[in-house]
Image (cartoon, grey):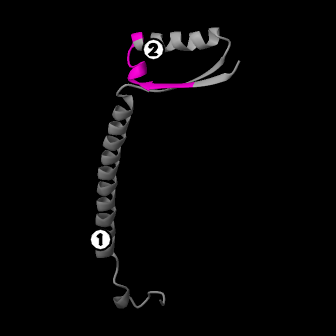
């Protein structure tokens, strides 16, 4: 016979009953002598959940990075404020 590729995802694997239907369909093709390759993607709604989680995580990371940048700027400004003035120091190394 032949090789058959079947792809299922979304609502077609959205609950146990639908998954059972997919399994029965695959079994029918195997029973007919076909070699069956089955590709299963995310269940119904899962891709949207993953995208939402990724966006939420990105927003949290961006907020964290912004806070870290602000802290670095503040430390840098304090360091510059407290740095000795090289022009008034006669022992300073030449620039």
For marks 2 and 1 on the same chain, the one whose residue lies earlier in the sequence: 2
* Tag 2 secondary structure: helix
Q: Nearer the viewer, residue 7 or 75?
A: 7
User: Where does the N terminus fall, quadrant-wise?
Assistant: top right
Whether pointer 2 and pointer 1 mark residues with C-beta atoms closer than 8 Å, the reply is no
Q: Residue at x 38, y 28 (%)?
A: 46
Q: Nearer the viewer, residue 77 or 33?
A: 33
Residue 3 lies, with reference to residue 54, above or below; the image says above
Where residue 19 appears, x then y in whole percent? 45, 14
For disc 2, the marked residue is: 19
Q: Nearer the viewer, residue 41 or 31?
A: 31
Q: Nearer the viewer, mark 2 or mark 1?
A: 2
Q: Which mark is residue 47?
A: none
Q: Residue at x 52, y 9 (%)?
A: 24
For disc 1, the marked residue is: 77
10 drawn magenta: yes
**Which contiguous range is marked in magenta?**
6-17
Q: Residue at x 34, y 28 (%)?
A: 45
């Amino acid at each position: 016979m032949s090789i058959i590729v079947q792809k299922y995802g979304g609502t077609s694997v959205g609950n146990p009953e639908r998954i059972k239907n997919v399994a029965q369909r695959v079994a029918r093709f195997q029973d007919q002598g076909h070699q069956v390759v089955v590709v299963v993607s995310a269940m119904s709604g899962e891709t949207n959940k993953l995208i939402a989680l990724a966006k939420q995580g990105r927003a949290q990371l961006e907020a964290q990075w912004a806070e870290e940048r602000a802290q670095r700027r503040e430390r840098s400004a304090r360091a510059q404020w407290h740095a000795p003035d090289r022009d008034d120091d006669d022992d300073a190394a030449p620039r």
